[in-house]
């Protein structure tokens, strides 16, 4: 029996930071029929709030060092302002959204990352996704809106990368649905030349991925994203698209498709 | 057929501001069997964050003037930090909590209060409680944790008094459940003499309430709370208790019970 399709989109700062762009995205996203989940980041907003509160932001290889004070900032920004605004924006468009941190319905549990060479502070590595709960919510016709805050079941909130959440939620849901994952991005896709915004690689499979890795052809920022994507594909996620927001309404535009 | 009992508790700053007190409350609350809902405020935390961000706090008769900037502070504090921490704290105790702003699952819609003599800004007056959704969540064995943020279905978030939310959620749920509402308070109950913390009025019915109003015997801060309570009782809410947190584990301590 063919499984039902589940569409999972992940958006980041380029959409979230711009109220008009976000509003258009939420309208387009609302129109997608069938089960869907939205995952969002919000790092830039967190950094801005931290600045106003004179809390220093420290990043190592694009990963935030989450001190106790920074965790509060992250929770206020991701689970508070951004998540709640997105949910209200979707409701406006008739999309019955439900905002979730990992603690809500115990949907994402994580463990605090052990300091090895770097102490990332209150950074959480996912241990389990509660797919039964997500399926139940989706079956009620609702759209989960998941932010990058998880918990350890011991009362501790943790900061978890939203790209990773999207990939792991997609992987976990793949047993129950035919999952299509969409990383909504500021660029048109994965580029061969970062200077040329149209140098999009239309299709990357495992062989092509290995070749790109070998030739150091992928920009630094894209590496963890692609790594997450291929892990998800190995976990039976059907297709992954990396594209800008226009892809939602026009799937024929230039974009990158990833398959095994 | 006797309706199932639904326990609704409302907590405010006196519990929320003190991590140890909050932790004990969440442990005691988790132990309560059967369907339950927790409603929380967080005004003091919002005021503190506003101060750090140099956003002026203006209150008139204990009601916050919610400018656009203050609304962001309110959403970050109530829906973000406080709600998410409470949910994680309940999960720790095995209570499967689900944090909700009014936009989540469209659970509480409101309208922006029209400026009459006072412009309260983005303050929302409740228009509807989505009791079907709350019942569905509760039937799944989950505990809704509701904060004082609502929405107008047009994408606008609004600041709504948590005492009012508790009373209106209780009223709305009374058609489906036998509702017991508990206002958890820093004092032992409604006092005859604000100087004497033990001068608790054990029972207030409508006649006693009218008498207290006539004799100006109720402190200013308690008036809107009692007004909300009697409105809820008129809407078939079964019993209301005003007491401090110890009442959760010891219902025989000094407290105030309200009935019609």
Image: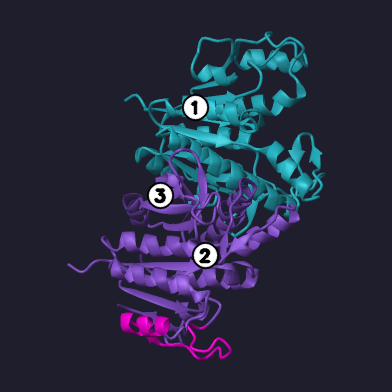
Chain colours: A cyan, B purple
Q: Is residue B209 magenta?
A: yes
Which label belongs to residue B93?
2
The residue nearer to you, when weighing B122 against B142, is B122
Chain of the residue under the numbered disc 1 shown in the image: A
The residue where tag 3 is placed is B107
The residue nearer to you, when weighing A126 against A7, is A7
Chain of the residue under the numbered disc 2 shown in the image: B
Q: Secondary structure at mark 2?
A: loop
Query: B217 above or below B93?
Result: below
Q: How many numbered discs?
A: 3
Q: Which tag is nearer the camera, tag 2 or tag 1? A: 2
Q: Secondary structure at mark 1?
A: loop
Query: Where's residue B122, x and y in %?
Result: 54, 49
Query: Where's residue A77, x and y in %?
Result: 64, 45
> Where, by quadrant of the figure, is residue B65 drawn?
bottom right
Q: CA distance from mark 3 to mark 1?
A: 35 Å
Q: Residue at x 49, y 75 (%)?
A: B222
Residues rendered magenta in the picture: B188-214
Query: Where's residue B173, x and y in %?
Result: 32, 60
Query: B232 above or below B201?
Result: above
| Residue found at the far front of this picture | B117
Residue A259 seen in this snapshot: no
Q: CA distance from mark 2 to mark 1?
A: 34 Å
- Judge the density around disc 2: few (<14), some (14-19), many (≥20) Cα neighbours within 10 Å: some
**Do callouts 2 and 1 mark residues in contact (Cβ within 8 Å)?**
no
The residue nearer to you, when weighing B231 against B17, is B231
The residue where tag 1 is placed is A236
The quadrant the N terminus of chain B occupies is bottom left
Q: Is residue B175 magenta?
A: no
Specify whether disc 3 shares its chain with disc 1: no
């Amino acid at each position: 029996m063919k499984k039902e399709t589940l569409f999972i989109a992940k958006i980041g700062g380029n959409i979230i930071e711009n109220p008009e762009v976000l509003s258009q995205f939420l309208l387009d996203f609302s129109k997608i029929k069938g089960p869907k989940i939205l995952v969002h980041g919000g790092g830039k907003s967190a950094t801005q709030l931290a600045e106003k509160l004179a809390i220093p932001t420290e990043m190592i290889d694009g990963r935030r060092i989450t001190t106790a004070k920074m965790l509060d900032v992250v929770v206020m920004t991701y689970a508070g302002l951004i998540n709640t605004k997105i949910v209200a924006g979707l409701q406006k468009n008739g999309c019955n959204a439900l905002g979730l941190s990992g603690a809500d319905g115990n949907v994402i549990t994580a463990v605090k990352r052990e300091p090895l060479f770097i102490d990332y502070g209150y950074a959480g590595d996912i241990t389990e996704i509660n797919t039964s709960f997500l399926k139940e919510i989706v079956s009620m016709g609702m759209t989960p809106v998941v932010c990058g805050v998880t918990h350890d079941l011991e009362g501790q909130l943790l900061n978890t990368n939203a790209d990773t959440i999207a990939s792991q939620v997609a992987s976990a849901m793949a047993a129950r649905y035919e999952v299509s994952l969409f990383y909504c991005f500021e660029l048109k896709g994965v580029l061969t030349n970062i200077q040329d915004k149209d140098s999009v690689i239309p299709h990357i499979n495992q062989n092509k991925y290995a070749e790109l890795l070998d030739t150091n052809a992928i920009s630094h920022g894209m590496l963890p994203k692609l790594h997450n994507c291929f892990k998800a594909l190995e976990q039976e996620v059907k297709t992954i698209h990396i594209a800008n927001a226009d892809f939602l309404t026009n799937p024929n535009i230039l974009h990158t498709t990833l398959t095994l």
